[in-house]
Amino acid sequence: MTTRRIRPPVQPVHATVRLPGSKSDTHRALVLAAACAHPVQLTGVSESRDTELFLLALRELGVAVDQTGETVVVDGSAGISVIDTTLDLELAGTTYRFLLPICAAAPVGASVVLTGNARMQERPIGALVDALRSLRADIEYLGTDGCPPVRVRGRGRLSGGPVQISGQVSSQFVSALMLSASRCAAPLEVILEGAIPSQSYVDLTASVMKRAGVEVRRTAAGYWVSNVPATYTGYRIDGDGSGASYFWGVAAITGGTVRVENIAADSAQGDVQFVDALESMGCRIRRGEGWIEVEGPGTLRAVDVNFMALPDTAQTLAVVAAFAVGTTRIRGLETLPFKETDRLAAMVTELSRAGIVARADADSLTIVGGTPTGARFETYGDHRMAMALALFGARIS
């Protein structure tokens, strides 16, 4: 394990930051590109480990991938040619879930084992597997039912038509199904069971598909998705909205001003709503063409907010709340226990190391603002824990 000390800068922090590509946007664009009958050039691609694993997996499945920095050309015109392979996706949950339908639609005779690390093998995928099986997918659990690893045998094409899915555990299940439509024999009718906690991510999926030329319609029951492959040949990845939260958070807790570029105020990513919470805490927000700027106040005030649409930024706000006056409650977080780690329990533990009182229930975090102290934090192998907790280094030594 690598341990690093973060030392506070001269306060307040004033900076301009250009965002790298969004991992969420990248994943969706890659799935669509791999199903096209022609090469697709993606620019501004996320260079995260999850994206790297996705590209490695596509190559292993026989999809031609040519990468130069943040530009990737994907040519799926030859289809999937794998016969027998194992894909170790480590802790890349989105990658795992989005690859399941791709592997299920591999040629008859193909066999792919999808596995991951110990935490991945605890993360639930049962609702997605059940939905794919109803579309004629051949998926076998190799360990605990409802969790990785699984063996997927190719069926050529999925059947399409109506399919029911619950997004209560993860909106990625719904997105994975929507993105699989081009690998179906008929248009897909995704019927949603109950409300989706992270609806903004499904909205993002629909937005990316439409930008790529795929017909998607919202229906009373859910979504209707055309099975005609995407028509795009080029695509620019949006800046990473969830990653922006860390820079905006630094401005908030230091009373500085940080402008984040390569992010649109009207981005389809729900994570840009993070600045609305900061505004309620006393920050000043400015927006321009392709940028959003946050100026921190002299004193932060506590808020009561619902982060159902942007749960990946909840940890960032929890750290900001540690410096606020009053008690902050962040609601709508029922999916956080099923992430790379149990993020609700982990945040309570780590905030307490800094001398901050916090508690969690099934779907919320409550943080009593105070004067955080220096601490040695555990990140649980979770990048969002590491990035959020790093904010403490901007104020305390």
Image: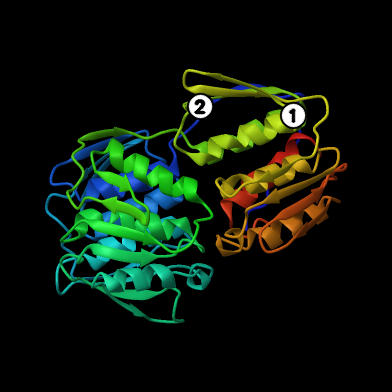
Locate residue 165 relative to residue 392 in the image: left or right: left
Query: Eyeballing the image, is 192 above or below 217?
Result: below
Which residue is the site of mark 2?
Answer: 265
Residue 246 rendering spot, x and y as whole percentages: 62, 37
Where is residue 154, by image quadrant?
bottom left
Which residue is the site of mark 1?
Answer: 9
Q: Toward the viewer: 261 or 268?
A: 268
What's under tag 1, amino acid-wise?
Answer: Pro
Is residue 114 at all visible to an observer of this figure? no
Give whichever of discs 2 and 1 has the lower sequence position.
Answer: 1
Locate residue 357 relative to residue 209 in the image: left or right: right
Q: What element carries label 1?
A: loop
Q: Toward the viewer: 167 or 154?
A: 167
Locate residue 272 relative to residue 363 in the image: left or right: left
Residue 379 rendering spot, x and y as whole percentages: 65, 55
Query: Eyeballing the image, is 43 above or below 123?
Result: above
Q: Toward the viewer: 183 or 71?
A: 183
Disc 2 to disc 1: CB gap under 8 Å: no
Query: Eyeballing the image, is 25 above or below 160?
Result: above
What's under tag 2, amino acid-wise?
Answer: Ala
Specify the farthest residue to the front: 220
